[in-house]
Image (cartoon, coloured by chain):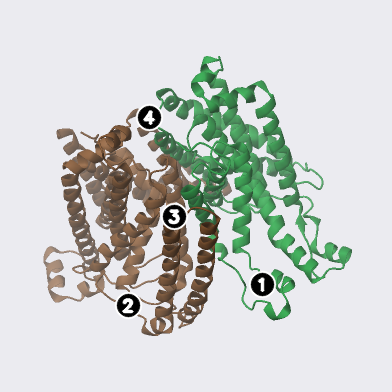
Chain colours: A green, B brown
Amino acid sequence: MDFLNGLVTFLNFVFVPALAYGSQLALGALGVTLIYGILRFSNFAHGDTMAFGTMVTILFTWWFQSMGINFGVLPTALLALPFGIAATAAFVLATDRVVYRFYRRQKAAPTILVIVSLGVMFVMNGVVRLIIGVDDQNFADGARFVISAGDFKTMTGLAEGLAIKSTQAITVITAVIVVAFLFWFLQKTRTGKSMRAFADNEDLALLSGINPDRVVQVTWILAAALAAIAGVLYGLDKSFKPFTYYLLLLPIFAAAIVGGLGSPLGAITGGYVIAFSEVTVTYAWKKVLGYWLPPDLAPDNLVQLLSTDYKFAVSFTILIIVLLFLPTGLFKGKSV
Amino acid sequence: MTRNLALFAGLAVLFVLTGVFQSWNLSLSILNMGLLSAVMAMGVNMQWGYAGLFNTGIMGFVALGGLAVVLVSAKPVPAGWNAGGPGILLALFLGAATIAAAVYLYRRMPKGRTRSLTMLAVLVGGFFLYRAVFDPAVLAVESNSPQNAGNIGGLGLPSLLAWPMGGLLAAAAAWAIGKTALGLRSDYLAIATLGIAEIIVAVIRNEDWMARGVKNLTELPRPFPVPYEVDLQQTASFLNWTASIGADPVTASSITVKLMYAGLFGLVLAAVIWLSERALNSPWGRMMRAIRDNEVSAEAMGKDVTRRHLQVFILGSAVVGVAGAMLTSMEGQLTPGGYSPLRYTFLIWVMVIVGGSGNNWGSILGALLIGWLWLIVETVGPGLMGMITAGVPEGSLKSHLVDSAQHMRLLSLGVILLLVLRFSPRGLIPEK
């Protein structure tokens, strides 16, 4: 019984939150890795692209709510999400046309493109703050729990409850659908195949008649969609605040690099690696260990390896370890 | 040459106009921030302009400089130090020793599972040992009159001594980060420095024993020749002098103080310019530029690229650290909440790029110009926005627009950066 109680506590406070957070990171890292693989630079504006998509979705959510439209037990934001994706894709395609295309034609060094993406980050950051402000926005509605801690206790008769928030369930399900779609797209469709060919060897791809502009456009649209979805899921699960989205850049990059930049499978693995390490290291294990260890071994202190204020340090440490020992990442991405 | 002089003259006119139409106090405080930013921009220019290293962690090095001021010049807290100071030092030493031991094992033991397991055991054991010593010591320090102190206190030494210390702290951090991230692809350095900066600021914010965290550490002493306004206003000779030129003693005292800061910062800036101009025109400087322009051929000529990169990365970060220490000295307090990546990392980058990367004078011009714009908008912006929206009826829309004036800064900064990169990538004063 003690073992089960400990397990449920573990699932409730570590596994379920980390699974949801990992799915959000994985979607974000997929966007970064796609841009990296095809456009060959690290897009620093990705965090703010997520914020932009989320902002548009929130605005549509408010509009729908004011008209009395809702999605039943599901959050209204899911109805608004397609509009968020469309707006983000339009914005991102416009920045590509106005900003990035020039440097691509010049074959500018990757560092220059990174600095350019910083400029784009500023602009997006400014636009988001100008429109929606800097404050926290909570836009989740619909049913709050798939199963609440109290229900779980009465159902199983255990002393500990397992709560699964509906936003967590939605996050994981959406992530699975999106990833399945993305892999189907990359593996089976003609455009997806040409994207992979382009990422593999640009010159050969051009020789075989692949239209580079089309590949780039599709990449931006996919990255925008992934960013908007990741942003909305994160915002539903926690809350929306522009500065938090900027800070997400670090774990997302860490996830993409851990998996191997340019490798979609790596980005997903990386997302979960980062999320699980972050949650495990910053969780206070006292309660779980109290159940699992014999009473005389039970710890007196919190058994928290790091305070939650340092959760960035976790992604950072993993990043450094990977850079030192496995510069190409777990799934052999590109290193140069 | 005449063009550059004209640019600097134009800049001087901006400051004079601010003095005449707003106030000399404002103009001078903008000038002081501009001079500080210029020193930071010089550091960034060393890294980016001379060597092509993309460092997005400038904020972290600025914050480390500020921390040095607290540790060197804040007044001592004997009770706090006695409660746990030695324990904390011991713990930090143990932590460093653990990492050193792991690195030693990694280098000495043959590759294989035994090595990984031994390293893991050393690291985990070291971590728990470190926490076992560290936690009680921190608790002891922080429970010593938390309202007023709760920290280990500084050394109580003059503030000027803290400036080189700030440089040293920043250099040490740069060494650690450079050792790991340099030599890999260029984006990795950007991401690693972005992370380290956030971590440094998080440490300063949360480790109350060090600098009181978000409770802020105030009453840091001023650097040597700068007096306090209150003291000036009670000095007979100063009062006679203000009376003789017919100035208000309060305004005059604050302007005098600001002028003295400007002089001090100007001296430091001049020293940094002199040193880096000398370095840039020496064989070392030519080698750095050769490496920047073509790493492969420089390496073929027998230059150790990674080592030179590490060297210039440390030097540049140290300059930024000194500037950070100067900043905290001038403000008289350490406010960890004030370190935002936007203000202390990306703004400096815009200064360097707009001014002209690779050219020291360009960086200074960019720093003073962008610094002026950034701060003048802070004072003039809301008024301007009020004027623009004068026709809009009172209500939430109008207040939203007026409040949003500060976010316009971000937007315009981004647009300026993109425009300069596109149409004048060599900046206002291009590299020769």
Position above or below: B204 against A171: below
Chain under disc 1: A
> Which tag, 3 or 4, sits closer to the chain's start?
3
Is circle 3 on the same chain as circle 1?
A: no
The kind of residue on which mark 2 rests is Lys
> Which tag, 2 or 3, sits closer to the chain's start?
2
The kind of residue on which mark 3 rests is Ile
Position above or below: B192 against B220: above
The answer to whether residue B79 of the structure is visible from this angle is yes
Q: CA distance from mark 4 to mark 1?
A: 56 Å
> Which tag, 2 or 4, sits closer to the chain's start?
2
Q: CA distance from mark 3 to mark 1?
A: 30 Å
Q: Is residue A181 left or right of residue B299?
A: right
Instruction: Name the residue located 21 percent from the left edge and 70 percent from the top edge.
Output: B227
Instruction: Name the residue located 81 percent from the left edge and 48 percent from the top edge.
Output: A73
Q: Nearer the viewer, residue A20 or B127?
A: B127
Is circle 2 on the same chain as circle 3?
A: yes
Q: Which quadrant would the N terminus of chain B be assigned to in this image? A: top left
Between circles 3 and 1, the one closer to the viewer is 1
Between circles 4 and 1, the one closer to the viewer is 1
Q: CA distance from mark 1 to mark 2?
A: 39 Å
Q: Is residue A118 left or right of residue B361?
A: right
- Residue at the spot of label 2: B75
Q: Residues within 10 Å of mark 2 (few under 14, many from 20)?
A: some
Between circles 2 and 3, the one closer to the viewer is 3
The reply to whether dot 3 and dot 4 touch (C-beta < 8 Å) is no
The kind of residue on which mark 1 rests is Lys
- Residue at the spot of label 1: A286
- Residue at the spot of label 3: B196
User: Tag 3, which secondary structure?
Assistant: helix
